[in-house]
């Protein structure tokens, strides 16, 4: 089912109802076939393209990432306005300018995106007169759609491991969402320029899409397969496994290195939805992924502990933060 398109596996989700993750419709042969392809791709590469035609209506897509859409309306605000959404204590949650990042892109993170005060709190700071209801509706509707896809994928992974229904419900409850909206400055040349440095995501899953400008590059084959620069087909979304899915699956799924390289003369807007454990959730491999032959590779830890480690200056240069974190003792030494 997964075609290696010269790049990453492309998995057709036709016949998979995104609402099925929360209800009936998961006992079909189709569900089982897509689930097998998803698990294979995530174990082998940690990334695939999910083609789910119709998940996002063309009007919603244009309202989010098209000319004059929500992404453009945020990034075209004056720098001093965007700076109001800076999070002093945790800079990675909030707005970051290209001068802060020292790379030609700017980015915005909204945590708990679907909480009633998530996006509206941003909008009332950015547009103090009326708060911009259409921006809020667009961002929330888009988030809901991508979140449904992330929920389906997480359920498929857990089912593949043989996790119990209770375990799957527990993981769904433990999940929290964060949205990242990034604007990559156009280099104005055909030659590619680094937009976002090489990294792994710390999440369970990242679902991402953009305004028609490819740029994501991912290392394949668990680091042994070279780099791919996947194109995004219509109705397609890139799905990446993050470090926390690697822990949950006891190293079956792999969190791949990736980066962004941009070219041309148009600003690239990317919308990334992260599904993460809640800050106070204790992350550990699910029982179904651990046995005598395969003992737990990671000690249980609170997600906020990993986030603190992930963003600490001291470990900034490490490409495999999960490995570095695991090498530390329980008391951080
Ligand atoms: O812009 C992209 O395509 C990827 C962004 C990304 O990897 C991230 O924000 O973690
Ligand atoms: Fe990433």
Image: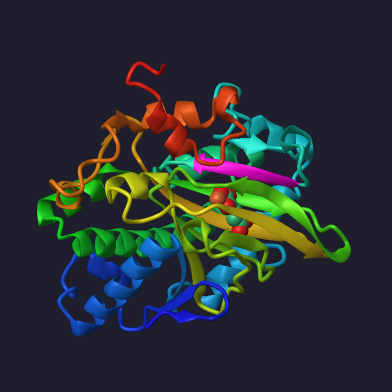
Is residue 312 among the parts visible in the rendering?
yes
| Closer-to-camera residue (314/222) | 222
Q: Which image quadrant: the C terminus? A: top left
**Which residue is painted at 46% across and 68% down in the image?**
48
The reply to whether residue 70 is in sight is no
Q: Which sits in the foreground, 127 or 8?
A: 8
User: Relative to residue 293, is residue 66 depicted above or below?
Assistant: below
Q: Residue at the location (37% across, 44% down)?
A: 244
Question: Residue lying farthest right?
Answer: 189
Q: Is residue 306 magenta?
A: no
Residue 99: which quarter of the image?
Answer: top right
Q: Nearer the viewer, residue 113 or 133?
A: 113
Q: Quadrant of residue 92?
A: top right
Residue 220 position within the rendered picture, expressed as x and y whole percent measured from the top left: 52, 63
- Give left or right: position of 1 versus 156: right
Q: Is residue 290 left or right of residue 280?
A: left
**Predominant SS of the magenta segment:** strand
Residue 315 in which image quadrant: top right
State left or right for residue 28 relative to residue 189: left
Position of the N terminus by quadrant: bottom left
Q: Is residue 32 above or below residue 254?
A: below
The boundaries of the magenta stretch are 105-110
Q: Is residue 283 above or below residue 304?
A: below
Whole-percent x, y for residue 282 in the image: 26, 33
Spot occupied by residue 79 in the image (x, y as percentages of width and height): 77, 38
Total marks in image: 0
Q: Residue at x 56, y 69 (%)?
A: 61
> Whole-percent x and y of residue 20?
24, 70
Task: Look at 63% across and 64% down and name the residue there.
Answer: 65
Whether the magenta-drawn stretch holds residue 108 is answered as yes
């Amino acid at each position: 089912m997964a075609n290696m398109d010269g790049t990453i596996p492309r998995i057709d989700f036709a016949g998979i109802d995104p609402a099925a993750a929360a209800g009936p419709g998961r006992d079909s042969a189709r569900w089982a076939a897509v689930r097998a392809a998803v698990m294979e791709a995530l174990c082998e590469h940690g990334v695939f393209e999910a083609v789910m035609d119709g998940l996002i209506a063309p009007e919603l897509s244009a309202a989010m990432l098209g000319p004059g859409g929500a992404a453009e309306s945020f990034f075209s605000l004056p720098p001093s306005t965007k700076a109001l959404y800076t999070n002093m204590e945790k800079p990675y949650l909030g707005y970051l300018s290209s001068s802060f990042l020292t790379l030609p892109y700017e980015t915005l993170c909204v945590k708990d995106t679907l909480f009633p005060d998530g996006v509206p709190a941003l909008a009332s700071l950015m547009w103090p007169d009326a708060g911009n209801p259409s921006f809020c509706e667009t961002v929330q509707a888009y988030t809901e759609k991508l979140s449904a896809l992330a929920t389906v994928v997480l359920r498929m992974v857990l089912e593949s491991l043989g996790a119990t229904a209770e375990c799957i419900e527990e993981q769904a409850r433990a999940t929290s969402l964060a949205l990242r909206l990034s604007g990559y400055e156009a280099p104005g040349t055909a030659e590619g320029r680094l937009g976002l440095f090489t990294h792994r995501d710390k999440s369970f899953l990242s679902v991402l899409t953009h305004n028609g400008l490819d740029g994501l590059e991912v290392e394949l084959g668990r680091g042994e397969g070279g780099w791919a620069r996947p194109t995004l087909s219509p109705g397609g979304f890139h799905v990446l496994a993050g470090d926390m899915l690697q822990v949950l699956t006891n190293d079956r799924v792999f969190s791949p290195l990736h980066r962004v390289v941009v070219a041309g003369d148009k600003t690239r807007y990317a919308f990334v939805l992260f599904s993460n454990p809640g800050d106070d959730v204790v992350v550990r491999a699910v029982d179904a992924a651990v046995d005598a032959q395969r003992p737990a590779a990671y000690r249980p830890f609170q997600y906020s502990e990993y986030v603190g480690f992930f963003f600490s200056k001291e470990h900034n240069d490490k490409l495999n933060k999960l490995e570095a974190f695991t090498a530390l003792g329980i008391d951080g030494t």
